[in-house]
Image (cartoon, grey):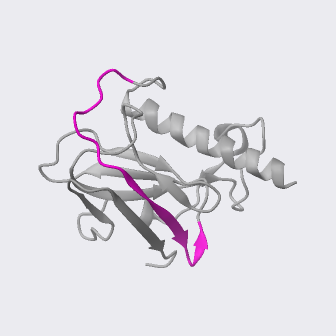
Amino acid sequence: MLYSTSRQMNSIALFVCLSVITVAGCSAEKSDNIPELLIPVTGTVQLDGEPLGGTAVKFLPYGDTKGKGGYAITDSAGNFEAKDYSMAEGIEPGVYNVTFSKIAMPDGNPIPEGQTAADVGALEILPPHLTSVNPDNMKYMLTVESEPISIDYELNSKR
């Protein structure tokens, strides 16, 4: 059972990762167009005190920040390592608005193995204040300079 759950989480993570890459207009292969300077960004994500596995973490450029931003997928313990959209580890220096996304069954269970989100009516299970950029509430901002960053996001399902 644990193996099956782990495989389901990996399937979800792969689906979210491929969706993010497709939306960004990039291929799933490592690009030759890797930015000159990428800074390692690692951390954890928890929701209401519990690790939030199988979740996409998106780093969206803010203000004058150049580049495309980055993304990460959390493992079952909520750990992540950010990547640039070229698939290289790290993200460019700058200021980022950070959003979170978790696609699952309406009851919160993982998408069944061999199924896609569309097949089973899976949907975003995180509340809108975590999934969208809101100029009135820029709670999850990250400034990346020249040193590696480790950050822990302790999310609350309530606003």
Nearer to me, 98 or 90: 90
Q: In the picture provided, is 4 more to the left or to the right than 38?
A: right
48 part of magenta stretch: yes
In percent of the image, x 33 and y 20: which residue is there?
Answer: 32
Vertical relation: 156 (above or below) 32: below
Nearer to me, 75 or 48: 75
In percent of the image, x 30 and y 29: which residue is there?
Answer: 34
Position of residue 107 measured from the top left corner of the image (x, y, whole percent): 72, 62
Vertical relation: 145 (above or below) 16: below
Is residue 111 visible in the rendered image? The answer is no
Q: In the picture provided, is 133 more to the left or to the right than 153?
A: left
Position of residue 71 measured from the top left corner of the image (x, y, whole percent): 41, 46
Is residue 149 visible in the rendered image? The answer is yes
Toward which corner of the image does residue 83 lie, by quadrant? top left
42 part of magenta stretch: yes
In percent of the image, x 20 and y 56: which residue is there?
Answer: 145
Q: In the picture provided, is 68 more to the left or to the right than 23?
A: left
The quadrant of the rendering that contains the C terminus is bottom left
Segment tinted magenta in the rendering? 31-51
